[in-house]
Structures are given as C-alpha cells and as structure tokens.
Amino acid sequence: GLDLRSAASQARARLGYMSQKFSLYGQLSVQQNLEFFSQAYGLHQGRRRERIAWAVAQFGLQDFLAHNSADLPLGYKQRLALACALMHEPEILFLDEPTSGIDPLARREFWARINQLAAQGVTVLVTTHFMEEAEYCDRLLIMREGDILAAGTPAEIKQRSRMGGAEPVATMEDAFIRLVEAGGGQSG
C-alpha cells in the first residue's frame, strides 16, 4: 500500500528480511548486533530494551550475548538473523533459504517459528530448494530458470503434476520433478 519512490522508509519499516548467507556483522557480538538492528529499525530506548529482551529469550541467545556473531554455530547464527529481522515486528517477512545448512532439529524449530509468525498474522515469503519444506506453506510458486511452472496450494500442485493420467504423487519433490520434466505449464 505504499509507493516505494515516495515512502521507502515507511515501506521498509513494514518489512523484515533474512538472507540465506549470514549477513549480520560478524565482528560484533550478539548483543551489539541486536542493539544495532533495533536502532536501525528506529526503536527507541524503552522499546529497544523490550525487543532485545524478547529476542534473547525467544531465540535462546542468553549464553551467547558476548560472543562475536561470526563465531556462533550455524543454527545460532540463523536464530540471531531471524531475531534481527523480527526486531521491529514487521508485517511482511522475507526469508531466503532460511534453513540452508542447518541440522534437522534446528530446521524443525525454525519452521515452528515461521508457522507461529504466520498464525499471528505476519505474511511470510520463503524461498527454498527443499520441497519437503515447501509443503509447510499455504501457497507455493514453483519456478525453474525464471519460469513459473505451477502456483497454488501444495495439494493443487500435486494434483496438477498428474498430467496425462499419471499416478498421484506422494511428495512435493515428486510433483516438482514431474513438472520440471514436463517443461512446466502455468497454473492459477
């Protein structure tokens, strides 16, 4: 609802972003990163302290506050990156390959957090190469080399992959493979 040419800062205040590659300040401590991002998002003293306390408790960062973020295990780097992206309580959250490289338990925890955010009304847009993760989403857009192969709910996409009377597929990965092999076909 905002024109980015005239209201970029207002739009930015509504958006959160977490990149696939760890993009926080590795030479800063966890505490310093939290302080920096809360200030960058315009949170003032009382609100800043409140949101930092929330992030530390919510993401289990208490034992790492003095550690340089570059030295954290990957799962904790991801926690810190998500905490920073959520510091200002954005309405829309962009997650680029958020679970790339983390272990299955951390991946499950991460998706539980994402689903909790969505249940609270945050719009979450996720890019992923993990088709089993895509199944957690309400709606999917499957792309290959910039072309849209299918869009819809996971069930709709699985159904669309049954081209030419093919057997039903059990997984999103199977549906993806069929769609790619068939060369696509756009959806609604």
Image: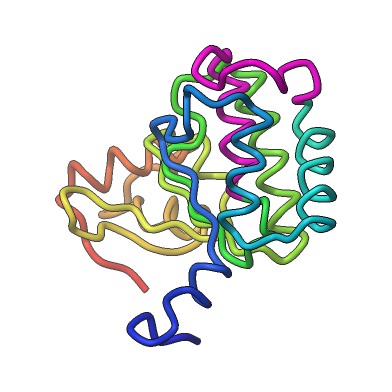
Identify which residue is drawn at 44% across, 83% down: 7
State whether residue 132 is above or below residue 179: above
Picture coordinates of residue 151 (x, y %)? 38, 63
Query: Which of the two residues, 81 or 180, is positioned nearer the viewer here?
Result: 81
Count the numbered circles shown.
0
Task: Please tell me in which quadrant of the rendered image residue 63 appears.
Answer: top right
State whether residue 67 is above or below residue 3: above
Residue 176 in magenta stretch: no
Residue 67 in magenta stretch: yes
The quarter of the rendered structure image containing the C terminus is bottom left
Image position of 145 (left or right of 110):
left
Query: Which of the two residues, 26 or 116, is positioned nearer the viewer here?
Result: 26
Picture coordinates of residue 70 (x, y %)? 49, 18
Identify which residue is drawn at 81% across, 37% down: 58
Identify which residue is drawn at 81% across, 58% down: 47
Magenta-colored span? 61-85
Picture coordinates of residue 101 (x, y %)? 45, 20
Task: Please tell me in which quadrant of the rendered image residue 64 appears.
Answer: top right
Task: Please tell me in which quadrant of the rendered image residue 75 appears.
Answer: top right
**Helix, strand or loop: magenta stretch:** helix
Image position of 148 (left or right of 3):
left
Query: Which of the two residues, 172 or 30, is positioned nearer the viewer here?
Result: 30
Image position of 90 (left or right of 25):
right
- State how the image is colored: rainbow
Picture coordinates of residue 10 (x, y %)? 53, 77
Image position of 83 (left or right of 1):
right
